[in-house]
Image: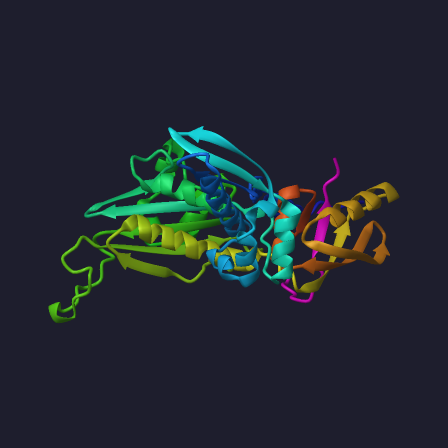
Amino acid sequence: MKIFCPFIMLRYLLVFYVVIFSTTALSVEVTDLYVAKIPVASQVNAERDKALKKAMAAVLVKVGGQESVLTEPLLKKALANSRSYMSQYRYVRNNDENQLLASFDEAKINQLFIEANLPLWGSLRPQVLLWLVEEDGLSRDILSASANSPLPPLVADFSDSRGLPILLPLMDLTDVSQINIADFWGRFKTPIEQASQRYIAEMAVVVRISNDSLITEPQAMDNCQPLCGQKSYVIDWTLFSDSQSISSKSLDFSYQGVNKSSLLEQGLADITQVIYQRYALATNSEQEYTIDIANVDDMATYVTIVEFLQELSSVSSIQLKQAKGNSRRFSLELIGSKQAFLASLKLNKKLAQFIDPLADIDPNAVPVFLWESE
């Protein structure tokens, strides 16, 4: 005789919820990493060559995730011969502006990074939800993509130039009815995470822009800096993310100056740097990662799983270590971080990590994943 236990049922419901919820956070596959548009004044050869060099530099920054890659000697040398890395180009007209649209060879660009021992971010990138809170005197607003402000277009341009998927909230009736701006200004973790859930982003960033309450006390006149006598702004940011990537709350950064657009660009660049450091694939290092995959019911499923793992850009090799029942234990040689591997799983949505919310935390436990069959 079987006995129904409400606690056991609750336990399985909680486990089911956590497994399903863990698959909802999405990475985004950026498809135009090796393409760039550069404004041109004409189509003469000299102008074209200058534009191709700028286009390749833009691609290197997108692939590498940070502008500092342009200072690497090997990449600087390659820039001088940009035509050798180009796949094709054409001229387009966009917003009454003539532009050169150039595509570059993915394999050749990646090889440059490998030879220079520079990390490759890859096309799998985390979706970032940006809560942009602007304070003007006594007024505070959270900006949407359609807000009447020069800042959302700046965010969109930065997102495109760095290949980092950045999403601004809709600020529709759902957001307005659920959000208390004071929670975002105070950077309170729980309400921010609750408001961010509908956007299914891997991480959320709160950026505060102020010309009032965040301004520091003015310096003495005899030590006056260029800010004195000018309207000043302060921008700071805090990054929140899921438990599988960066810690739940990142360090805060703050900037003060007279141009809020420039300050926001600096903040976004530093945010990108923090994310890049966690997700980039190191081209000169590998590490072993052991995982268990459950519900492997037959040989066909096993073969499909092996093929799936072999196709992941973050995995260099796999080895079957153990077969027990319908579970298979694999040893993976990862290129780069475990975070990059987990991000690739989220995008493909074939493997969902099994997390028991009632189990004791064991740092040495082998993570268990469930194979999602068609």
Q: Quadrant of residue 364?
A: bottom right
* Residue 317 x/y as whole percent: 77, 56
Q: Quadrant of the C terminus?
A: top right
Q: Is residue 190 above or below residue 167?
A: below
How was the colour assigned to the protein in this rendering? rainbow
What residue is at 13 percent from the left and 57 percent from the top? 229
Outermost residue to the front: 45
- Who's the residue at 36% across and 40% down the image? 152
In the image, is 33 to the left or to the right of 293?
left
Is residue 363 a member of the stretch shown in magenta?
yes
Whether residue 295 appears in this view of the structure is: no
Give me the residue at 36% from left, 37% from top.
144
Residue at image coords 37%, 28%? 96
Is residue 112 visible to us here?
yes
Residue range (magenta): 360-374
Find the residue positioned furthest to the right. Answer: 299
Q: Identify the image quadrant of the N terminus.
A: top right
For this orientation, the residue located farthest to the left is 221
190 with respect to 220 (left or right): right
Q: Main secondary structure of the magenta part?
A: loop
In the displayed structure, 178 sits above or below 241; it is: above
The picture places residue 113, in percent across and down from the top left corner, at: 61, 57
Nearer-the-camera pick, 268 or 194: 268
Q: Is residue 337 left or right of residue 258?
A: right
Tag count: 0
